Image (cartoon, rainbow, N blue to C red):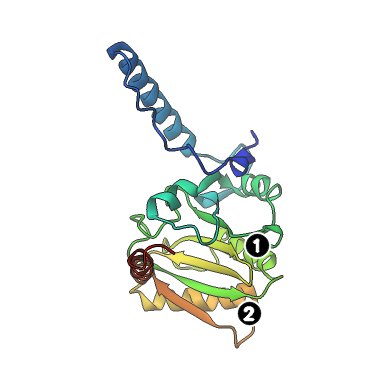
Amino acid sequence: MNNKFDALKDDDSGDHDQNEDSGSPKECEKEESDEEDKEQNTAKKKTVVPGAGEHPLQYNYTFWYSRRTPGRPASSQSYEQNIKQIGSFASVEQFWRFYSHMIRPGDLTGHSDFHLFKEGIKPMWEDDANKSGGKWIIRLRKGLASRCWENLILAMLGEQFMVGEEICGAVVSVRFQEDIISIWNKTASDQATTSRIRDTLRRVLNLPPNTIMEYKTHTDSIKAWEDFHGLVNASGGR
């Protein structure tokens, strides 16, 4: 398998910029043809399959990584551009090939996130699979993120939550004072499902009874984000 972790080394610029020079008609046609070829190649790459003799997972998954400078104004577009896709996998063996080479969350610095989502679902509130859903959030003291993240994603890949197709993905967010893990599901209004996810989360993470767990709908997250940035813009900056 090729090393796909070079995505972590990319800077935050240029991935989505287009050259404004239009060029000659022939050049334009060639560029359009090249773009079509790229899109077709990308579509081919997106579908991963288990190798011979490997143990298939029920769903394919994709690892993502993001990092940003705290305090820098963010937008939905800049957030999407800042997410780096590490790679997708379809089997237990393919998962371990990625995971064994990845930095553990506890060793990350700054304002960093790992995302593990079903293939085809972007780790964004606005994604069609996420927009009617929400997430369970657990804030962790420093030193617990690596163990909790591993337990969470192994439980997710092993279908321990027993909620059918409801699980979309999971996120670990490394911050300066604390770390945060969350698991996202499709239907925020389904209380039976969200309760089952909460109870399974407590069990697989072996959380103390007094651990605070918060469920937040993505609709509320979007509204809070818009309200905050509205206040920031109204104040003339940060």
User: Contact (CB < 8 A) between labels 1 and 2?
Assistant: no
Where does residue 20 sit, x and y in percent of width and height? 35, 27
Name the residue: 48% across, 78% down.
214
Q: For mark 1, does the 10 Å Cα neighbourhood hold few (<14), some (14 to 19), or many (20 or more) residues?
A: some
The residue under label 2 is: 207
Q: Which mark is residue 88?
A: none
**Residue 139 in which image quadrant:** bottom right
Name the residue: 62% across, 38% down.
6
**Residue type at the position of mark 2:** Leu
Q: Residue furthest front?
A: 236
Q: Is residue 149 left or right of residue 45?
A: right
Seen in the picture, residue 39 relative to 86 is either above or below; the reply is above
The residue under label 1 is: 150
Give the mark, 1 or 2, whose residue is nearer the N terminus: 1
Residue nearer the viewer, 180 or 225:
225
Secondary element at image label 1: helix
**Residue 234 in which image quadrant:** bottom left
**Residue type at the position of mark 1:** Glu
Where does residue 110 sit, x and y in percent of width and height? 63, 59
Q: Residue furthest left?
A: 25
Q: Is residue 23 left or right of residue 208?
A: left
Q: Residue furthest bottom?
A: 210
Residue nearer the viewer, 142 or 5:
142
Name the residue: 51% across, 73% down.
137
How many marks the image carries: the answer is 2
Secondary element at image label 2: loop
Q: For mark 2, does the 10 Å Cα neighbourhood hold few (<14), some (14 to 19), or many (20 or more) residues?
A: few
**Quadrant holding the C terminus:** bottom left
Residue nearer the viewer, 162 or 53:
162
Q: Is residue 147 left or right of residue 61?
A: right
Where does residue 215 sit, x and y in percent of width and height? 44, 76
